[in-house]
């Protein structure tokens, strides 16, 4: 992990963006988080190392249209753009692996699904604020880009 000029940690490996990163890119109430999220998303596209999942796209739509008041058409346009990233389709094997992680690590099912999907995508780092920063789960390092 490296740090940029603002102290945000970044990886040179494949990485996974959790829903909260995408939502903060639309958050007018938190300019610092918005800027950090946009840097990560830009890096995901420019480096071609960023990954998301169908779960993330679904959660993103619901969150930005209900919490961030983004019009549905604008959210749809963003999803079209975000889907250009390496997007993992959540299949039954990933779901069952998430159930196992839920049982082993006592994670919420949805967090376990994000971790398992990141691993299935070959990502070494998961950018999220929803799990303990620095924790390694199922071989994936959790990194809070906002903390």
Image: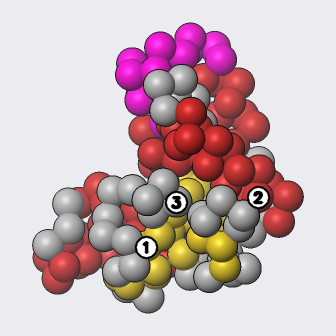
**Is residue 44 found left or right of 104 in the rendered image?**
right
Crowd band around label 3 with a 10 angstrom C-alpha radius: few (<14), some (14–19), many (20+): some
Disc 3: which residue:
145
In magenta stretch: residue 48: no
Figure quadrant of the C terminus: bottom left
Question: Is the stretch drawn in magenta largely helix, strand or loop?
Answer: helix
At a point 82% along the width and 65% down the height, the residue shown is: 47
Between 145 and 88, the one lying in front of the other is 145
Residue identifier under label 1: 142
Which numbered mark, 3 or 2, is in the foreground of this view?
3
- Residue 58 % position (x, y): 47, 38
Nearest the viewer among 38 and 73 is 38
The residue positioned 85% from the left and 58% from the top of the image is 46
Q: Which residues are magenta?
A: 60-74
Asked if labels 2 and 3 touch by Cβ distance under 8 angstroms, the answer is no
x 65%, y 34%: residue: 79
Residue at the spot of label 2: 43
């Amino acid at each position: 992990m490296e740090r940029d000029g603002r102290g945000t940690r970044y990886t040179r490996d494949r990485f996974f963006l959790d829903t909260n990163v995408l939502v903060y890119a639309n958050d007018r109430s938190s300019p610092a988080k918005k800027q950090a999220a946009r840097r990560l998303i830009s890096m995901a596209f420019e480096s071609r190392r960023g990954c998301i999942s169908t779960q993330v796209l679904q959660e993103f739509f619901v969150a930005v249209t209900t919490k961030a008041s983004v019009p549905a058409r604008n959210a749809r346009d963003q999803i079209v753009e975000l889907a250009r990233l390496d997007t993992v389709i959540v299949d039954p094997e990933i779901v069952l692996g998430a159930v196992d992680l839920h049982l082993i690590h006592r994670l919420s099912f949805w967090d376990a699904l994000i971790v398992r999907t990141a691993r299935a995508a070959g990502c070494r780092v998961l950018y999220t604020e929803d799990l303990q920063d620095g924790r390694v789960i199922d071989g994936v390092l959790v990194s809070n880009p906002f903390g």
